[in-house]
Image: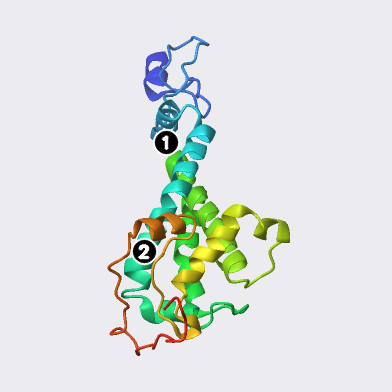
């Protein structure tokens, strides 16, 4: 009878959850269960990025610096190219305090950055933080200081870097409210772009939308 009971498992100890059931019969020493795949993956991430905060900060700073030339290229070849019909609203109403069609272009990078920050690893989180930081810096310098679409403290406006930004960005709008825009296309690096003539061969995208005539009376045209 005892052999039959032992064979059927009667009288065996039941291991609690989280403890391996394979332990010696009659012994109180219990072996902890093996870590799951997710736990092993998190440990691998910690080994790859032992200091996640520093990794996020480094990637965010690198993204913040690299975003300016990338934005200049996008402005030159996308906004003044296939997306000109949408970007034209900014050149027609550069100082409008209300939202214009061109402002909607910020939705996709900001939404993408929010997803990266919430669900990404250290590198993707840093990429999202850097993108959001550049978007804020761009809106401050471009819409706030250069065009005065919202109030900016006078202390910031009088800073040398922002006074140079305002002066050089006005060259981009040299055609007036109906102008089509020209070099420079950058914001923070605009003085270097204009000095080095990086966009000297720029041609206005008049074929994509209705042609916009540049004012002849403007001495900068």
Horizontally, residue 50 falls left or right of residue 157, namely left
Residue beneath disc 1: 38
Q: Is residue 63 above or below residue 200?
A: above
Left or right of 84 on screen, residue 57: right
Q: Quadrant of residue 112?
A: bottom left
In this rendering, the answer to whether 51 lies above or below 121 is above
The quarter of the picture where residue 59 lies is top left
Give the quadrant of the N terminus: top left
Q: Position of residue 68 (x, y in %)?
A: 44, 54
Q: Earlier in the sequence, mark 1 or mark 2?
A: 1
**Quadrant of residue 8 within the rendered picture:** top left
Residue ID at (56%, 56%): 137
Residue at 59% x, 61% y is 140
Badge 2: residue crowd in 10 Å (few <14, some 14–19, many ≥20): some
User: Residue visible at 67% across and 58% down?
Assistant: 158
The residue at which mark 2 appears reads as: 74
């Amino acid at each position: 009878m005892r052999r039959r009971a032992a064979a059927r498992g009667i009288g065996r100890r039941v291991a609690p959850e989280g403890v391996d059931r394979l332990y010696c019969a009659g012994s109180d020493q219990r072996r902890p269960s093996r870590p799951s795949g997710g736990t092993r993956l998190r440990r691998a991430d910690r080994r790859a990025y032992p200091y996640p905060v520093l990794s996020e900060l480094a990637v965010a700073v690198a993204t913040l610096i690299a975003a300016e030339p990338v934005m200049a290229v996008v402005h030159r070849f996308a906004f003044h190219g296939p997306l000109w019909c949408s970007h034209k609203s900014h050149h027609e109403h550069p100082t409008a305090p209300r939202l214009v069609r061109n402002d909607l272009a910020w939705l996709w990078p900001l939404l993408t950055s929010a997803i990266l920050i919430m669900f990404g690893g250290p590198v993707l989180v840093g990429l999202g933080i850097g993108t959001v930081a550049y978007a804020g810096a761009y809106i401050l310098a471009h819409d706030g200081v250069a065009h005065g679409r919202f109030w900016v403290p006078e202390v910031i406006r009088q800073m040398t870097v922002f006074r140079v930004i305002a002066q050089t960005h006005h060259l981009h709008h040299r055609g007036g409210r109906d102008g089509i825009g020209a070099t420079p296309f950058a914001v923070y690096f605009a003085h270097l772009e204009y000095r080095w003539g990086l966009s000297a061969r720029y041609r206005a995208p008049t074929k994509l939308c209705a042609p916009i005539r540049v004012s002849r009376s403007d001495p900068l045209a």
